[in-house]
Amino acid sequence: MTPKTPSYLFPKSFTWGVATSSFQIEGATQEDGRGPSIWDTFCQQENTIVDHSNGDLACDHYHRWQEDLDLIKSLNVDAYRFSIAWPRVMPQGGGEIEQRGLDFYDRLVDGLLERNIDPWVTLYHWDLPQALQDRGGWVSRETVDHFIEYTRVVCERLGDRVAGWITHNEPWCASVLGHLNGDHAPGLKDHYAHLASSHHLLLSHGLAVPVIREIVGDKPIGITLNLVPSVPASPSEADAEANERFDGFFNRWYLDPLVGRGYPEDMLKRYREENYIDDWSFIHEGDLEAIAEPIDFLGINYYSRGIIRSDKVTETDNEPIEVIAIGEHTDMGWEVYPQGIYDLLTRVNADYPFTSIYITENGAAYATGPDEDGQIKDHRRESYLREHLIACHKARTAGVPLDGYFAWSLMDNFEWAFGYGKRFGLVYVDYETQKRTLKQSAQWYRELVTSRVIP
């Protein structure tokens, strides 16, 4: 007798969506009063973007937004997560408001609602106004005040129609890649800048939540973290210690303060023992209480796991243990590991009191282009999505309050320091003609969200 195929059914209340960010798709960087962002500046510097490109045109979404909303509508999704470009709304970061910028997002929100798609707004997805960076950026506490001002302006204009609000996308990336590794804008490599920026990002989140709530009422408000489940590469004590440090550095430094635990004590101890920084004055009295302002959901972005090796042991001692089987990799060099999203969701649910969780990004970069018939048969992306969604379903069955999933990304776009060489989209973009073409994975995703059952 042939065993019955499992039915991975999701409830009608589960939110299906797609996601983008402003700098990656909008283009029109010098139109309608938009000011420069730190990414405009970063792209102009030498050896920052792999293909020497920039976001000046990107996907030209600023002009093609109606076509793009029709694409989203064709996928039958419930929601669209996009970000507001701060320098398009407030070119100097504060003070004067650029009404033409707000008008664009006003049209975008109304266009989504006309198509019965719920707008989900991310207030900050890394494109800080350069004018604020010139005054210290996220290393300066002044930027926190400007973020609150900007938040109020956006909410007062769009708050009556937006379905969900996210304060920040991936503060780890903004603080570590932008201020410690120098791989992202503003390109700093400084320990103090790393920790001060991470604190100010979290503080601005906590202070923004009651401002948003005051204006939008009972609409859900949260923050999105990129979290990485990790394992030690070997049974050595050194690898175990390195793995614990990685978890504190990558995950707990951002999770713990959100729920009122402050910064992890083990990480504070390590930073002090390592003389990582000698000035902690950026943390003021009352800050940790502000960061812990209650939120309605946690957004999680998941792409792969970490296999952590210590640099304090020899290669012989550091041999991988047998249970670590390395799978295939995406074009980003990231291991395809669907079990990781289950491990992550169940861990967060066990360790933290969040009552609602959304996967706000999940996807894979593959360069699959059109074949001779114009079809884009991206089987690997379809398989990636299917296996990760099965893991999400299993997490829900295990009791995780997972209420939605946003695929990354709606379309191929500017992939930050990698330029246009990495394609995450469900929709293929020909960057010369700007023609959009649904990939096979998009058609698969449409079938999924229409039936609510994983095909």
Image (tube, helix red, strand yellow):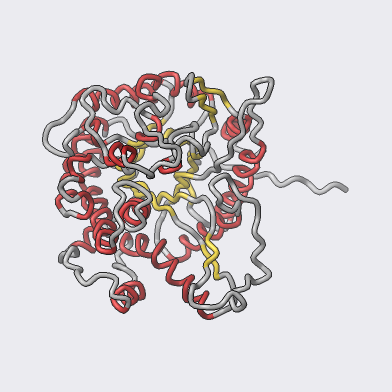
- The residue sitting at the right extreme is 1
Rendering coords of residue 177 (x, y %)? 37, 53
Q: Residue at x 26, y 31 (%)?
A: 158
Q: Is residue 90 visible?
A: yes
Q: Nearer the viewer, residue 44 or 94?
A: 44
Q: Observer-nearest residue: 265 or 357?
A: 265
Residue visible at 20% across and 43% down? 214
In the image as oriented, which residue stretches furthest toward the left? 95
Look at the picture and state if 432 lies above or below 225.
above
72 displayed left or right of 148: right
Q: How many marks?
A: 0
Residue 382, image x, y percentages: 63, 38
User: In the displayed structure, does residue 44 sit left or right of residue 372?
Assistant: left
Quadrant of res 53: top left
Q: Quadrant of the C terminus?
A: top right
Position of 64 compared to 214: left or right?
right
| Rendered residue at 34%/36% (across/down) | 83
User: Residue 306 placed where, x, y %?
Assistant: 52, 61
Query: Is 396 rendered above or below residue 273?
Result: above
Quarter-wise, where is residue 159 in the image?
top left
Q: Residue at x 53, y 78 (%)?
A: 313
Closer to the camera, 352 or 397?
A: 352
Q: Could one spot residue 295 in this view of the protein?
A: no
Question: Between 72 and 200, which is closer to the camera in this rendering?
Answer: 200
Residue 119: x percent and y percent?
A: 38, 32
Q: Is residue 196 left or right of residue 11?
A: left
